[in-house]
Image (tube, rainbow, N blue to C red):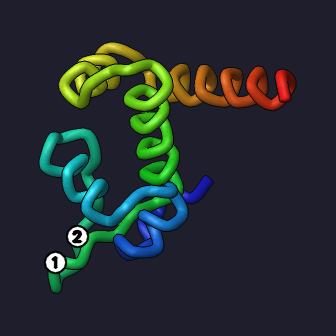
Amino acid sequence: MRVRPVYVISVAANLAGVHPRTLRIYEEEGLLQPVRTPTNIRLYSDDDIARVRAIRYLTRRRGVNLAGVKIILQLRPFDDLVDEVRADIETQAEEL
């Protein structure tokens, strides 16, 4: 995965399957910290995209609000959460 931020907000939102405003909200809530260029443009990495997908999983699939997501992300290693999301997706795919 790319750790280096390379995606502008519109591309990152498209890759994550969300609206650009969603990324701004996640940043305002302290859930996401994109890198800023000298001209203040947000840049997102592949890790940021994975984080957005994990946040969406927690809010949509698990019913957790953004305050709860913030606590979960503080208490739990992010890699463990990504593994859980992948396992859940694989289980859903098998059920289809």
> Which x, y percent locates residue 46?
52, 56
Residue 19 is left or right of residue 89, and the answer is left
Q: Quadrant of residue 35?
A: bottom left
| Element under disc 2 | strand
Task: Name the residue tied to disc 2.
Answer: 36
Give the camera-side residue of 44 and 14: 14
Task: Name the residue tied to disc 1.
Answer: 40
Q: Quadrant of residue 42?
A: bottom left
Does the residue at mark 2 contact the one at mark 1 (Cβ under 8 Å)?
yes
Residue at mark 2 to residue at mark 1: CA–CA distance: 5 Å
Q: Residue at x 19, y 25 (%)?
A: 67
Which residue in the rendered view is the most extreme toward the bottom?
Answer: 39
> Which x, y percent locates residue 57?
49, 32
Residue 1 is left or right of residue 68, and the answer is right
Give the camera-side residue of 75 and 92: 92
Q: Residue at x 17, y 82 (%)?
A: 38
> Which x, y percent locates residue 58?
42, 26
Q: Is residue 46 above or below residue 37?
A: above
Q: Quadrant of residue 96?
A: top right
Q: Name the amino acid, label 1.
A: Asn
Few, some or many residues within 10 Å of mark 1 (<14, 14–19, 20+): few
Q: Name the amino acid, label 2.
A: Arg
Q: Residue at x 51, y 23 (%)?
A: 81
| Element under disc 1 | loop
Q: Residue at x 63, y 25 (%)?
A: 83
Label number found at residue 6: none
